[in-house]
Image (cartoon, rainbow, N blue to C red):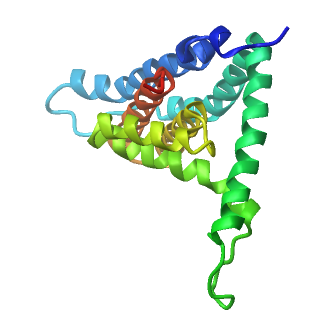
Amino acid sequence: MTTTRLQLPARRRRNARLIATLTHLIGDCASAAGSVYEPIATAPPEQRDVPVNLLRFTALSLSAVHRVDAARGEDDARWPDVAAAEAKDRDRTFAARCATAEAEGIVDGPQDGPIAFSAAQWAAIAPTGAGADFLTDVLDDPDRALRRVRELKATGELTADQILDEATDTAVLSGLLALHAAQNEQDPSTAAEACLAASRHFVLAIQVTSVDIETP
């Protein structure tokens, strides 16, 4: 069965399991932080050292990556035609970016420089940069963020979904890194703060992955 553009689901449906998993992770982050703050809040005022258990941060950090990966796999399995269409889009836009890089000499420069990128390397990293730029823009100026996505989409070198997916991946990775930091903290309050910081990244990821952008 061929998937046409009209048959594609809204992004929040396409990524429903990922969104649900991130929502549960946000709740788990709050619960883990609460397991630190609650004993401190209920301890007698004269008690100086309040024992808390930091194992929840370790368990949450270790499980989060697997939960996110499993959610993405389930979303792909639920929408196989859409996943196949997205793979074709990635191949097509990658070729377009390579052609642009070669035609415009984007990778030309001093040959004795510390870093030299081939056209294929530039084409591979461009979506990541576009996704990161979207996250910055959407926090500062949402209208500008949407406008830039439409402009990039018009070039044929990226799709809106690719940019939004990269932005989602960046936000999710930031949350996972914050959980890793919480796991490694020795101070309970600092660990709780890192865990709550992770939840903010997951909230942003949900917001981004739920966005649908249509070209006006």
Where is residue 133 shown, x and y percent of the image? 44, 49
**Nearer-the-camera pick, 205 or 158:** 158
Residue 88, visible in the rendered structure: yes
Q: Is residue 185 visible?
A: no
Q: Position of residue 174 (x, y in %)?
A: 49, 43
Residue at the extreme left of the image, as rendered: 45
* Residue beneath the point at 14% across and 29% down: 45
Q: Quadrant of residue 38?
A: top left
Count of numbered circles in the view? 0
**Residue at the image point whose x is 38% and y is 38% from the top:** 147
Quadrant, the C terminus: top left
- What is the x, y in percent for residue 214? 48, 23
As drawn, 125 above or below 209: below
Identify the residue at the far right of this view: 1
Residue 127 drawn at (x, y percent): 60, 48
Instruction: Residue at 66%, 16% (x, y): give it.
Output: 5
Q: Quadrant of the N terminus?
A: top right
In the image, residue 80 sits, relative to residue 93, either above or below, namely: above
Quadrant in which residue 43 is drawn: top left
In the image, taking residue 36 as reference, residue 172 lies left or right, namely right
Residue 207 against residue 176 in the figure, above or below: above
Task: Identify whether 130 is placed above or below 102.
Answer: above
Q: On the picture, is 25 further left or further right than 195?
A: right
